Amino acid sequence: MSGLVVASNRGPLQFALRPDGGLGWSRGAGGLVSALAPVLKGRACTWISAAMTDGDRVVGAGAPAATQLSRSQPRLGRARLRLLTFERATYDRSYQEVANRTLWFLQHHLLDTRTLSFDERFRASWACYREVNRTFAAACAGAAADDGSVHLEDYHLALAPAMLRRRRPDVGILHLTCCPWAGPDYFGILPDDLAGELLAGMLGADLLGFLTDRWARNFLACCEAAGYDVDRECGVIRAEDGHKVHVRSYPLGVDQQALWRLAQRAPTPRGGEFGQGRLVVRVDRMEPTKNILRGLDGFAAFLERHPRCHGEVTHAVVTNLSRPEMAEYQRYRAEVEHRVEEINHCFGTPSWTPVRLIVLDDHPRALRAMAVADVLVVNPVWDGMNLVAKEAVLVNQRDAVLILSRNAGAADDLRSGAWLVNPFDTAELAEALAGALAMPAGERAERSRRLRTAATSMPPRRWFAVQNADLARVRRSLSPEP
Ligand code: G6P
């Protein structure tokens, strides 16, 4: 039994079966896990996540190889890990069809409304999503101490709060959404019964967290449109059973010291490692929400208009692979590679490659690319927060100008120092690139100073502590801290 239980689809460690039958492990990827892992490492808690790989399934089933690996239970520091195993097809339909292909694309406004339809097959996938959520809720109910706290993370587990509340009304429940939240019209693309189930599921919590006020306001508007009694001013919704649900934003920032330690682990970049001349750098998961293609189009338009910059500026596109099993992501990667080839073919010379596409899974090395950038481009179509924008301004050594999508949650925190752009306007991006490269040193330094202050204002440890304290207050019928 734990006073604190955290549940997230992806766990902090990923296990892999080695050819010799043993188990290896690596760190789980993604912004949420990277923020939570260092915080929870030092706490006695239970962290529950899904077994996603074959190795995870071995550990989840407590098989001998796993016992060997961990002696008793796998742990991360003081945190005890528990991996839930699912029937493969059930889990895949929940994770791929519902969480990734539908909810993720919905909240990022990326559904293909020309072809989308919610048919019987989709409803069968939704039943799998429900089952996965039920299993998570049951595991949390079994792990939480009397009057303990349970943190349920992200859109994969949106139904679990209400399921958990029914089993364990004594525990405090927080649900945190780490992606954006769409407004009522776009959210209304979901069928009414499923949208209603999703909202009712989340409203089983005592406290609902979002990464910015914008997403929290959209959620309140969706609940109002669905007929709930909503106090927008105070961020309170009356759930169907009458309990009050508090809605708040928790803008995640970066731990500067930890980031510097990580950056030190990468060898100093060799001259020209990321390209020659002045560097425009972006670092993203290979993911349609990150808008890499329009970023490339903007860079091509910049080269078109500024021939004098040919040979003088290089664009380093540093990416790591994400959800490679999904056809949408495979296609997106192929399109990015194709566009890079086109630009290099059109503008390149024997001594200059305008775009360098670097696919790696090496966070320290990605940080080194950010360090040597003159301009940083972070232009997602929509993004819950985007920690790359915050990490980049902290490790950068050249007072780089940050060109940032106004639709990234990070834009709310970094607007005083960043150059905000509409992520769909590639002509505007081309102008911003030219303006950023021409910006006087004094202005760059001043903007960088503001960016660094804003990026560190809520490091993960404090971010998590504030959520915990708010949950405790809400359980005592007090309002969260303003
Ligand atoms: C990013 C998002 C998180 C999300 C995660 C899932 O890190 O910021 O909101 O939970 O992706 O990614 P995955 O690779 O686990 O599907």
Image (cartoon, helix red, strand yellow):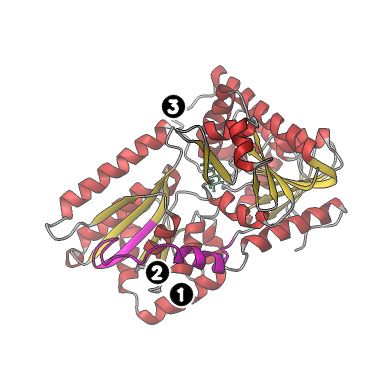
The kind of residue tagged 1 is Arg
Residue sitting at 42 percent across and 69 percent down? 396
Q: In front here: 34 or 264?
A: 264
Q: Secondary structure at mark 2?
A: strand
Q: Position of residue 345 (x, y in %)?
A: 16, 49
Q: Quadrant of residue 66?
A: top right
In the image, is residue 268 part of the stretch drawn in magenta?
yes
| Type of amino acid under label 2 | Val
List the residue tagged with mark 1: 447
Q: Residue furthest left?
A: 350
Q: x, y percentage for residue 378?
A: 42, 57
Q: Element under label 1?
A: helix
Residue 115's disc number: 3
Residues shaded magenta: 253-282
Residue that appears at 53% across and 38% down: 23
Residue at 58 percent of width and 31 percent of height: 57
Left or right of residue 380, residue 92 in this image: right
Q: Are marks 1 and 2 in contact (CB under 8 Å)?
A: yes
Quadrant of the frame with the N terminus:
top right
Give the Cα distance between marks 1 and 2.
Answer: 8 Å
Please give the label number shown on residue 401.
Answer: 2
Residue 331 percent coordinates (x, y): 35, 35
Question: Reading the chain from its start, which is encountered first: label 3 or label 1?
Answer: 3
